[in-house]
Image: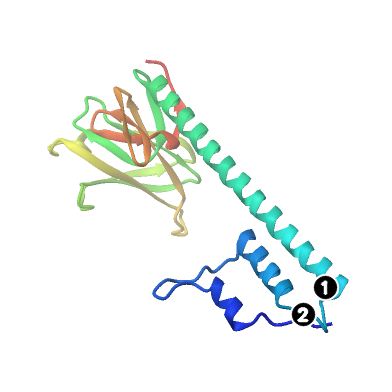
Amino acid sequence: MTAPVIPAATAGTTAAPAGRNPKSVLGKDEFLKLLVAQLKNQDPTNPMDGQQMAAQLAQFSSVEQLIAINEKLGAQATTDDATAKAISNSTAIAAIGKTVTALGNQVELPAADARVRGIVQGTGQGTLSLRDANGTIVARRDLGLVRAGDQSFALGDLAAGLPAGTYTWQLDVRTAQGATVPVTPFITGRVTGVEYGPGGAMLVAGRLRIPVGTVVSLGTP
C-alpha cells in the first residue's frame, strides 16, 4: 500500500526559511518529524499498513545509528590529532642539540664543510647544482660517475663566493641511455631550537626550518 503524501501545509513547516539554503542531509530529528507528520496526516480510510510502518521505523533507527557512529568517529579523529600533535612537540623538544637528518634539499651557506646527501637509486653521470631563493641556478658542477646508494658530496668551490643564505640543491643523475635516476635528497643540521606554527612544530637549524614530520633520524649532539 502506498504511503500518503504529506499535505503542503505540513511540509511547509520543515522547509528552510527564505534566503537560506536548505539542509542537504536530513538528521534524525527531521526524519522523525516527517514520520510523525506522515502518521498524523494519513488517510483514516486508507492507513499505512504494518509493513510500511516497520520499514520506516527501521530507516529511522538506521539514521540514528549512522549519526551516532559519525559523531564517535569525529571525536576519535579529534583525539588522534591531539595525540599526534603531542608526540610531534615531544619529538621536537628532544631533538634540540642533536644532529638531524630529514627529507629535503635545502642547504645553508656559508658553512665550513658544507655537504649534501642523497640516496641515488642507480648509477650514472651526475651533475650537482645550487639554486637561490628565486629558483635561479647560481652554481653547477659535473660529478662524473655517481654510483647507486647513500652518497654525500662536499660543495667545496661550488659554494665559493655565494652570499650567505639558504639554497636548494639538485643532483641530476642520468644513465648511459639518458634515463633519469631517482634521487632522494636529505637535509642535515644541528637543531638549536623549535618554532611552532599552524603547520605544527618546526626544528630550527641555523637558517633552516625543518618540519618534524620529515625527520628520518636523530644523531648525537
Please give the label number shown on residue 23. none
Whole-angstrom CA distance, mark 1 to mark 2, is: 8 Å
Number of numbered markers: 2
Disc 2 secondary structure class: loop
> What residue would you read off at disc 2?
3
Q: How packed is label 2: few (under 14 Cα within 10 Å), some, or many (20 or more)?
A: some
Q: On the rendered structure, is 47 left or right of 110?
A: right
Q: On the rendered structure, is 216 left or right of 63?
A: left
**Residue 70 location, x and y as percent?**
62, 51
> What residue would you read off at disc 1?
52
Residue 68 versus residue 145: which sits nearer the camera?
68
**Residue 202 location, x and y as percent?**
34, 33
Colour pattern of the rendering: rainbow
* Image quadrant in which the N terminus is located: bottom right
Disc 1 secondary structure class: helix
Q: Which corner quadrant of the image does residue 90 belong to?
A: top left
Residue sitting farthest toward the top: 221
Q: Residue at x 61, y 64 (%)?
A: 30
Residue sitting farthest toward the front: 44
Q: Which corner quadrant of the image does residue 163 belong to?
A: top left
Amino acid on which the number 1 mark rests in the picture: Gln
Residue 138 versus residue 97: which sits nearer the camera?
97
* Image quadrant in which the C terminus is located: top left
1 or 2: tag closer to the N-terminus = 2
**Residue 198 location, x and y as percent?**
34, 41
Residue 109 versus residue 182: which sits nearer the camera?
109
Mark 1 touches mark 2? (CB < 8 Å)? yes
Q: How packed is label 1: few (under 14 Cα within 10 Å), some, or many (20 or more)?
A: few
